[in-house]
Amino acid sequence: MAKDLPAWTIADFIHRGYWWENRGILLLNLYLLIPLLSSTVNGYDSSLINGLQILPMWQQTFGDPRGIPLGLISAAQMVGGLIALPVAPYFSDWFGRRFSLFLGAVVMLAGVSLQATATTLSQFIGARALLGAGLQTELNSAPLLVLELSYPTQRGKLTSIYNSLWYSGSVLAAWTCFGAYNGAKTSQWSWRIPSIVQAFGPLLQISMVWFMPESPRWLISTGRESQAARILSKFHANGYDERDPLVVFEMAQIRYALKMERDTSQVASFLTLFRTPGNRKRMRIILAIAIFSQWSGNGLVSYYINLVLEGVGFTQSSTKAAINGALQIWNLICAITGASLVDKLGRRAIFLMSNAGMLITFSAWTLTTALFNTIHSTQAAKATIPFIFLFYLFYDLAYAPMIVSYTLEILPFNIRAKGFALLNITISLTLAFNQFVNPWALDAIGWKYYLVYCGWLGIELIFVLKYVIETRGRTLEETAVLFDGEDFPAEIELHAGEAATVTMELTRADNRMTDVANADAKTVDDKRSSAISSNHTHELPGLSRADSWVRPSSSGSRPPPLADGGIGVAL
């Protein structure tokens, strides 16, 4: 049974004001824009093919690809990602999160160069595969940096915002294609310019990533605790010393969690993900939500909006491009809204709301599409567009912000990179399946294919009701071990709280001793002044200059660091 919790918890040490008034948190959040940009890069790349399909000059350049050729173009990115994903977590774990982000951005730049200059279908497909490999290498480390560096009270929102920013890239891709089409309808530049714009994100990351701090958890796992403590004290304790109670609390939690992981598991590999009952519970949820994120009907619009809109009578390129652009802006708004609600409503409640809403709105979308295709109802065709927007409202509430954040929250550090890689592998496999099956099924059976998704959405809702658990209100380490037994989260908080309590007691004792020393020094100074005023110029007996120096202290100030640069308490 867990012990009683100590007097001090993390809630006692967090910053209470606006985050932008705290210089450390402000600077940290500016640095976190670098890994957050990875989601925008992902959204741009994933949505680019959707926008290019609408452009006549792209279709003319590559022979108006449909069916299998179009499926190959869309699936090439996933194939490249699948090649990179098994090794990407090892780069993150061996060389650090920043190195993996840098490497992925470099590979992406090479892919962008090939894509923007492609003249044949094979070159374009090769460029897409190279882009996929670089993108997945980058995406394996970027959210880990956000999760493991974020200030404790902002971790949930920032990791949820991370994946929501996918739509910022999607918006940029859609409107870049729209603007290029209006500006150069009959020129090759109408599709090459959107490809060139894709290079800006990786270029910015390559130039800035080495200026940001490394993950403290990765540093501690590799034996560099002093460097991790300096990073936490600078960005979480507003530049104060390494004995700050918040720094001590976080360091103790991370150390104890890593020790527990080492004691209960062997060297981490992909098999470790399924070795213990707790890990199997985690992977059941992670693999399920990975599949749900792509097989909920959203893949129809995300990658084949051209076919979907033509299926309800919209054939003008400018109209389809405008609808696509507006939909991406709508998605971004809905995703950011979902991210802002994760700490207010809780993860489980949002998942339930999302899946129930998708089931209802997709059923209505299926009905209007069926009416248009069977009785050619123009009113049904017009009603399809609002239902698509409503469907994405519910999809974006949960699966845009939480597919990444919820996965990383429930994974312990030693398998976090590999578990996240398996999430991405699963997403890539389901996407690759979608790329081949969706266009073929839409051509073969039309709107009746939508009925398959209606049944699948019902299965998703039942799974979420039974298996998804709430993680709101816990630290990263407490959440990660939630699946291993009821006592483990309490034990981690207990050890961290005890470390903070001991540090607070040492600080108080140190301040009391300093006050006594100051009082003694004041008495000596008074005697010295009295002696000087009596024309006694000799040193007072038993007191030297070194003895009379006392470390200054003021009420409410944090104590200076220990002489050896330590953090006060070692668990």
Image: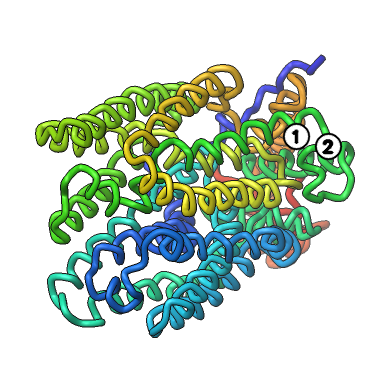
Task: Return the residue at label 1.
Answer: 279
Looking at the image, is 467 positioned above or below residue 446?
above
Mark 1 and mark 2 in contact (Cβ < 8 Å)?
A: yes
Q: Is residue 94 visible?
A: yes
Badge 2 density bin: few <14, some 14–19, many ≥20, Cα 10 Å: few
| Left or right: residue 223 compared with residue 323 | right
Which of the two residues, 164 or 48, is positioned nearer the viewer here? 48
Residue depicted at x 46% and y 63%: 34
Residue at 53%, 53% in the rendered image: 432
Give the amino acid at mark 1: Asn
Question: Which residue is nearer to you in this view: 135 or 48?
Answer: 48
Q: Secondary structure at mark 2?
A: loop
Q: Nearer the viewer, residue 392 or 282?
A: 392
Residue at the left extreme, as displayed: 379
Hey, what amino acid is under mark 2? Arg
Looking at the picture, the colour scheme in use is rainbow
Residue 47 in picture, x, y percent from top left: 36, 58
What quarter of the picture does the C terminus occupy? Answer: top right
Which mark is drawn over residue 275?
Answer: 2
Residue 243 numbered tag: none
- The answer to which image quadrant residue 18 occupies is top left
